[in-house]
Amino acid sequence: MKQDSDIKIICRQCGKEFVFTAAEQEFYKQREFSLPRRCRECRSGQREEAERALCSQCEVELEKGAAIYCENCLANVRLESEMKVTKLQGELDSACAKLDTEHAEKVELEESLGQKEKLVQEFEQKVNSLSEELKELRQLYETFNRWFEPVMSDLEGRVVQRLEAIEHGQNKINERLYKAFHKMLEIYENMTLWEVIKRSLRRSQVQTTEPNRGHAMD
């Protein structure tokens, strides 16, 4: 770009072509400005708009020193703000109620856990008590077993000896009965029935007369 020749630039706002003179180029160079992007008309219009105060909501022109909203927009903004505040307040109240409910549930849960812990402690105490009782019973059983075992062993020995003596006596009785039975068989083997009856009668007569003799002697 030569400083002694004008250049043409397309305005990016209105799209029209404008001439950027050599003098303007020299001035921009001295000030170290970049090349302009808008034409002079668009730039002057932008400054006029900058000097005017417009409503940021509806772009209605405002008086100098006025707020950024016109009266209608300001009322709408206030209404929207109040509605948002009301909504936020409702959400806050709902959140507080939820927190209160959760806190109550937490307290109830803690109480329930406390009761369960108490029951567990009582159960552990009962288990420990039963363990002690079981230990004492085991010691008592061992003591009783140490005392009772020799007694039972001695008693068992005596019972065995007694049974052996009874069995021995029964064997002797059986042997005597067997001998007496064979002797009776030998005695009555050659006798007739009539002789056996007569002998029995004699024996019974002797047994009846002997007591009478005893009474007479008395």
Image (cartoon, helix red, strand yellow):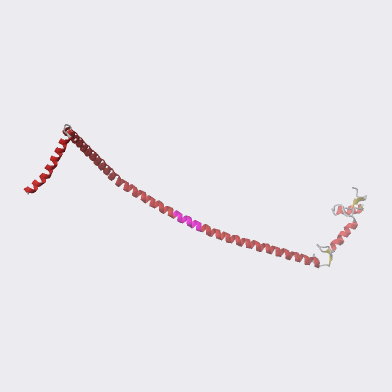
**Residue at 39% from the left image edge and 50% from the top image edge:** 134
How many marks can you see?
Answer: 0
Judged by its main secondary structure, the magenta piece is helix
Can residue 20 be seen in this snapshot? no
**Residue at 34% from the left image edge and 50% from the top image edge:** 140
In the rendered structure, does residue 75 fall within the stretch colored magenta? no
Q: Position of residue 90 (x, y in %)?
A: 68, 64
Foreground residue among 49 and 193: 193
Foreground residue among 175 and 80: 175
Q: Provide the residue span drawn in magenta.
A: 115-124
**Residue at 88% from the left image edge and 57% from the top image edge:** 43
Determine whether 145 is above or below 195 in the image. below
Can residue 126 be seen in this snapshot? yes
Determine whether 170 is above or below 98 in the image. above
In the rendered structure, does residue 120 fall within the stretch colored magenta? yes
- Could you say which quadrant of the image residue 198 lies in? top left
Q: Position of residue 194 (x, y in %)?
A: 16, 36
Q: Position of residue 116 (x, y in %)?
A: 50, 56
